Image: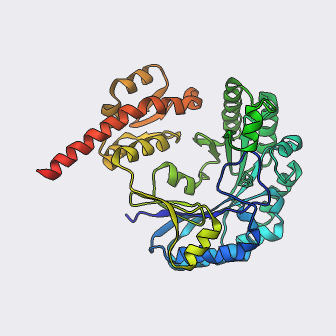
Amino acid sequence: VIETIALYVHVPYCRSICPYCDFDRQTRGIDAIPRYVEALCAEIATLPFDAVHSIFFGGGTPSLLSSSQVGDVLAVARQALNVTADCEVTLEANPGECSVDYLGGLGDVGVNRLSIGVQCLDDPTLRLLGRRHTADDARRAVASARAAGFQNLSIDLMLGLPGSTVASWSTTLDRAIDLAPNHISAYILTVDERVPMGRDVAAGRLSLPADDDVADQYEVTRAKLAGAGFEHYEVSNWAQPGMASRHNLTYWRDGSYHGVGAGAVGWIGGVRKKNTPSPTRYMRGVAAGRVETVEFERPDHGTRVTDAFALGMRLREGIDLAEFSYRYGLDLSAALGSELEDLRVAGVLEVREGQLRIADRSITVLSEVLVNLTPALARAAASVDARSDQLAQT
Ligand code: SF4
């Protein structure tokens, strides 16, 4: 079996910065996009000829690229890489940039999945979030995507927004379901204290709903989307049957991926690499024949195991215990011992048909569960390392 991998393409530009955002993005340099696209193409041309099952244009705002620029990147990818015939090609688009013409052009160059950043369907909240679109723009964007022939359409939503209640979030969800997307990502808003919205929250100028209210909003999400025929396949992601994101599943299953562009992260052959987040430095580096990286590391076995565990536990299918043991040389039941058993008895974790997963009612406390289990996991991984070192020396 040939291992297929994913390709992530980062577009770090935005027309304006949303007050809650802490991604690698900037408003400066939008006029440099043609040069930036050339740099992306040049970096992709240096990649090894791997088989690629998904390509994802993320940002920032990838819909700032023209359809022919997206086409240029895809053309180079098809030359440099073994892009599979059924490759999933996603582009994240802002609702204000989704004319039928533009989206049709994206379809023509090979984009076959759109992820539209709807966020919410209520104008005052969209303004508070600093978004440039309205709820009507979002509805029009979805209609344009269908008119342009897209059959795989995802929308992004955010819950736990300032001023939101279970009732207001239920209304948003009903409106979102009415849009009939194939996939919905619904993320709980978290704000870092260093971004403007975080400073407003810290200073008491803005308040976020209490944790219990957010947990209730999350429960409503699960119930409503299940009722509307969506499968809950990852903590924050729901899909119609067969429409889960292949690209994002690669991350959660600890698969390999290349990341190209300023600030992009790649994970191949046990090496994690992050490109410089500065588009200027990135373009200069590529022009000189060497992409500047800010991280280049080979995590130790313990880190690999705990990272893979944390990612896999986000999946509703959970972690296949036998496969985990085969890939990482660690029997999770033995490694987590009584901690796992206690959480299982308490109904926080479940083990069914060889899959370990978080129980429905405990999804919102997954991060606490992971914090509690990580030390035991890291200890067990360290002892596996010590044993293999001994074997290597004998
Ligand atoms: S459009 Fe997206 S990436 Fe750009 S600032 Fe807003 S949230 Fe951040």
Locate the N terminus by quadrant: bottom left
Does residue 53 lie above or below 334 as drawn?
Answer: below
Q: How is the image coloured?
A: rainbow
Question: Is residue 352 visible in the rendered structure shown here?
Answer: no
Question: Is residue 193 visible in the rendered structure shown here?
Answer: yes
Which residue is nearer to you in this view: 245 or 208? Answer: 208
Does residue 215 lie above or below 197 as drawn?
Answer: above
- How many numbered marks does the figure carry? 0
Choose top left, top right, bottom left or bottom right for residue 271: bottom left
Does residue 46 lie above or below 54 as drawn?
Answer: below
Residue at (49%, 76%) from the top-left corner? 46
Toward the left, the furthest residue is 394
Q: Position of residue 249 (x, y in %)?
A: 53, 52
Q: Position of residue 268 (x, y in %)?
A: 43, 61
Which residue is nearer to you in this view: 42 or 288? Answer: 288
Q: Is residue 386 left or right of residue 127?
A: left
Residue at (73%, 32%) from the top-left corner? 202
Does residue 47 lie above or below 137 as drawn?
Answer: below
Q: Position of residue 20 (x, y in %)?
A: 73, 44
Choose top left, top right, bottom left or bottom right for residue 111: bottom right
Q: Position of residue 365 (x, y in %)?
A: 56, 29
Residue at (67%, 32%) from the top-left corner? 218
